[in-house]
Image: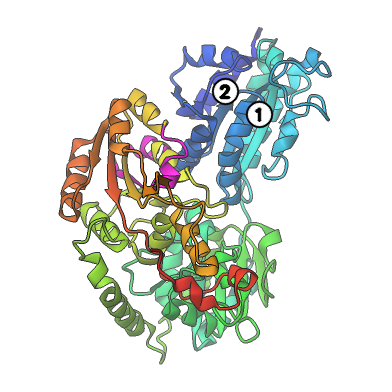
Amino acid sequence: MQKLISEQLVSYLEKRGVEYVFGLCGHTNIAVLAELDKSKIQFINVRHEQIASHAADGYARAKGETSVVLSHLGPGLTNAATGVANAALDSIPMVVIAGDVPSHYYGKHPHQEINLHADGSQYEVYRPFVKRAWRIDKAELFPEIIQKAFQLAESGRPGPVLVSVPMDIFSKKIDTSLFENIERHTRLIAKPSLDEKQAEEMIHKLAKAERPVIYVGGGVISANATAELAAIAEHFTIPVAHSLMGKSALPDDHPLTLGMTGFWGTAFINEQTREADHILALGTRFAEADSSSWYPEYTFDFSKTKLMQIDIDASEIGRNYPVEVGAVADLKQALSTLNRIAKQLYPNGIRRKYDIESRIRRYRQEFQQQIRDNAASDAFPMKPERILADVREALPRDAYITTDVGWNKNGVGQQFPIYKPGSILTPGGYATMGFGSAAALGAKLAQPDKVVVSLIGDGGFGQNPSVLATAAEEGIAVIWVIMNNNAYGTIAGLEMAHYGTTYGTIFKRNGELYSPNFAEIAKGYGIKGIKIEAAADFKKALKQAIAANEPVVLDVAMRNEPVPTDGHWNINDIYSPDSKKSHVSIP
C-alpha cells in the first residue's frame, strides 16, 4: 500500500506524541500543512520564522521533549536560523523540517532558492550549528532519515537537526511499510554512567577536600538530574555554584546554593570557586561570561584548584581548563552512581570545619541589604531591582520565567530567586534578543497550568512584537513584562564605560528619549496592554494579569542603570585598560 509522504510524516509525528508543530507557511511546505489540517497535532502559526524556532525552543525546555519546526525554504529557513542556532548552543533537542526547491530544478535557480555559488545546497547553511543536516535525495529514504533525525536530536548532547525536503518529495507516494519499519526502530538509547572505580576516586577526593565546590551548568537540568545533585551536595555539605544556564539546578533558597559565577557573579560567589581546592563540574562548558573570560584572578584558578569534570559531550571535557579526572556520562546516571558510592563509603556524610552554610546565609543577608533601597524604591521610571523584586513577590514559586538579554537576563541570574528546577528559560550561549518573548509561547503551551512571564527589554521585545498575534490567535496566556529603558541598555553601558558616549544604543526622536507605546501596540493585536505610570501600580497590575489568565503586556518604564559586576569580561582589556570604568552609570 502506498501513501503520500506528507500524510505518512504527519501520522509518524502523531505516533511519536508530537503535540505542536511551530512554523510558517510557504509554497514548499503546504502539502504538510494540508495533512496537519486533518491531524490532532496543532500547528502554531507565527508571523516570523525566528518566532517559530524560539517558541519551539521554549517548548522543548519546558516540556523536556524534542520540538518540531516546519519551515519554508530560502528566507524562511534563514529567518529561523537564529532561533535554531540559539537552541544548538544551549543543547535543546529540535527537529527542523524545511521545504526545499523541487529536486528536478536543481541548477536552474528556481524561486527563493539559496543559490548563486552552490545549487541544491540550502541545507548547508545550517551545518555550522546543527548536529546534522540532511537533504532528501530519494523519497524512499525519507522515513529512515526522519527517524534518525529524532534519534540524533535526543541522544548524547541534545541539539537541533535539519531535514531539508524538496517539495516534490512531500507529494510522492511511497510504500507504507517503510514508515512501519521505522516505528519499530530504536526509540530509547541507554546513556553511559560512571564505573565503580572512577566513582570511588571522585567520592574520596570530594570527601577529603577542605573547600570543595560543585559547579553546574544547564546539562544537569536537561538530564533531569537536579534531585541527584541535591542529594550529593547535602550528603557531603558541598556548596553549589552555577553558570547562567545552570540557574535553578538547585533552588535559590537552598542553604547550599551559592549562585551564579563570572562577570555578573558577585565577589563572594567568585571567591568560593576561585579559592576551592576541588571542583566537581557537571554539565557545563565553562563559558566566557561565567568564567570571567577565563582570567584566573577572578572566578576559577586551576593552578591551585583540582578539577573533576563530567559531561555527556567528550569535547567539553578539558576544553577550557585542565582536568584531573574527566568522565563522559549521562549526569543523572553519573550522579546516581556517585550518591550510591558516597553512602556506601561515607554513610554518615561529611560535615566540614569550613561552615559554608552559615557563610552563605550571611552573604545573602548582606546582599539583600545592598540592593534593599533600590528594590524598595518608589522612583519612576522604576529601578530594575524594584521590578525584579515585585515580579518575584507576585509570582507563585513554580512559575516559568523566560528572559532575554540585559537586566532581564544578567540581573535575573544575579538576584532573582528561582525555586523550581528548569523553570527559567534563558538564551545562554547565543544571548539572542527576541528569544524571551517567543520562548514564552512555547513554555506556556508545554505547561498550560503554570504562570508564564516573559521578562524582556524594549529592545528585545521590538525584535518580533508579532508574537502577540500568535498569542491572540491561539489564546496563549503569556504575560510580557517589558523593562523599558529606551535603549539597548547593556551595550549603552559598555559604550559609556569605555568611550564616554552611548551613540547608536539609545532610542531618541528629535533629541528626546523615544519608545513605542507597547501597551497600545498590544491592544492593536487584540490583547490587553497596560502602561505602568507609577512604581506603586506595577505589582498590582501584574497580579491582575496573572488572575486574568490571558495574554497581557505590561509596559514598565525602567531607569537605564547597569547590572552591578564583580567579575570580569575581557572587553575591558580590549577597549580600555581601566576595568573599573565598567561600573560607570549611564546618564
Tell me what residue is drawn at x 52 percent, y 55 percent: 428
Query: Is 433 in front, or is 330?
Result: 433
Work out whether 470 lies above or below 175: below
Q: Is residue 184 visible?
A: no
Q: Secondary structure at mark 2?
A: helix
Residue at figure coordinates x 65%, y 31% from the top left: 147
Q: Earlier in the sequence, mark 2 or mark 1?
A: 2
Q: Secondary structure at mark 1?
A: helix
- Which of these two is toward me, 136 or 71? 71
Taking the magenta stretch, the answer to whether it contains residue 415 is no
* Left or right position of 103 against 47: right
Quarter in which the C terminus is drawn? bottom left
Label 2 crowd bin: few (<14), some (14–19), many (20+), radius 10 Å = some
**Kind of residue at disc 2:** Tyr
Across and down, in percent, residue 318 comes to 69, 69
- The residue singled out by tag 1 in the image is 146
Residue at (67%, 24%) from the top-left corner? Answer: 181
Alpha carbon separation for disc pair 2 and 1: 9 Å
Q: Is residue 152 left or right of residue 537?
A: right
In the picture as drawn, the residue positioned furthest to the front comes out as 510
Q: Which residues are magenta?
A: 442-465
Query: Residue extending furthest bottom?
Result: 353
Residue 306 screen position, x and y as percent: 62, 81
| Residue 407: x %, y % from top left | 40, 58
Above or below for 16 versus 539: above
**Figure label count:** 2
Q: Measured from the top left, where is residue 371 in percent x and y?
A: 29, 71
Is residue 93 at all visible to an observer of this figure?
yes
Give the residue type at disc 1: Ile
Question: What residue does disc 2 label?
Answer: 12
